[in-house]
Amino acid sequence: MTMAGATAAKIAKKSFAPFAFFAFSIPVALSCSTPSSPAPSTPAATSTTPAVPAPQPVRVLMLTATAGFRHDSIPAARAAVAAIAARSGEFVAAPTEDLAELNPARLAVVDVVMFALTSGELPLGDAQKRALIDFVNGGGGFVGFHSATDTLYEWPDYGRLVGAYFKEHPWTQAATVAVEDRAHPTTSGLGASFSLTEEFYTFRENPRTSVHVLLTLDPASVGAQGDFPLAWTQTIGRGRSYYNALGHFDQTWNDARFQLQIAAAVRWAAGR
Ligand SMILES: [Zn+2]
């Protein structure tokens, strides 16, 4: 090798070394990119595969505030609703006694407002009352249980929302509840009738003319005569209202037949 040749070889070695490395790396890069080239599209494909996204759980604001009679079953009611929510995964319930939560900003992130065992003239301001009515009219759901009808007598719009006002409870005993609408989702699985021990309500006015009746008390089972609706639904504006007069005792909240109705009522009121 001449001097010049050796220099040229050195130069060549120096200058081609990167190429050599590059040339080496190309097949490596190719061999890497060949199997990995579908890889970027694979995650993209799988990310678009679930065309039906899991529905977000229904958001329930559960109010148990009282300004009159306070039921001993409030803790049982809260526990039952929490248990149903956890078991089904279909809804999340935020129990509260803070009336300040009835405001437009809070209701904007709620699907269903539940009045469970509320009572008396809850001190709501005009803006809060407007917020609740606007919420339901705008497509929200309202669910009331038991003494939700023994609540806010002095606010007629609330009376229309819940469907009736409590009059008295002549019968606290075991009795038969007739399922008047067996096709409604909230009565599914109840059969034609069921018996339980409850404090059975009557109302100042029979709501039948303005609501869709789901359950009635079988008057013969308490030795009475008449029409005694116990649960009903209404559509109000673009929203939905459900009421069920049962819920006086802890045992009712722990009763599987009542829990079925709670879960279905939340679902129905949310428009699911
Ligand atoms: Zn009661």
Image (cartoon, rainbow, N blue to C red):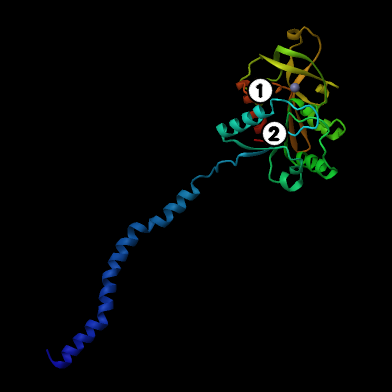
**For residue 222, side relative to residue 85 (left or right):** right
Instruction: Name the disc covering residue 250, or none.
Output: 1
62 to 47, vertically: above or below: above
The quadrant where residue 144 appears: top right
Of residues 257 and 181, which is closer to you in this image? 257
**Mark 2 belongs to which amino acid?**
Ala
8 to 68, vertically: above or below: below
**Mark 1 belongs to which amino acid?**
Asp
How far across and how far down the image is residue 245, in percent? 74, 23
Instruction: Name the disc covering residue 23, or none.
Output: none
**For residue 80, side relative to residue 103 (left or right):** left
Which residue is at 23% across, 86% downward? 11
Which residue is at 61% across, 33% downward? 82
Instruction: Name the disc covering residue 269, or none.
Output: 2
How far across and how far down the image is residue 76, in percent? 65, 27
For the N terminus, give its image quadrant: bottom left
Disc 2 crowd rating (10 Å Cα; few below 14, some 14-19, many 20+) is many
Which of pointers 1 and 2 indicates the residue nearer the eye?
1
C-alpha span from label 1 to label 2? 24 Å
**Most extreme residue toward the bottom, as rendered?**
3
What kind of element bears circle 2?
helix
The quadrant where residue 180 appears: top right
Of residues 125 and 50, which is closer to you in this image? 125
Q: Quadrant of ligand 1?
A: top right
How far across and how far down the image is residue 109, in percent? 68, 45
Of residues 99 and 167, which is closer to you in this image? 99
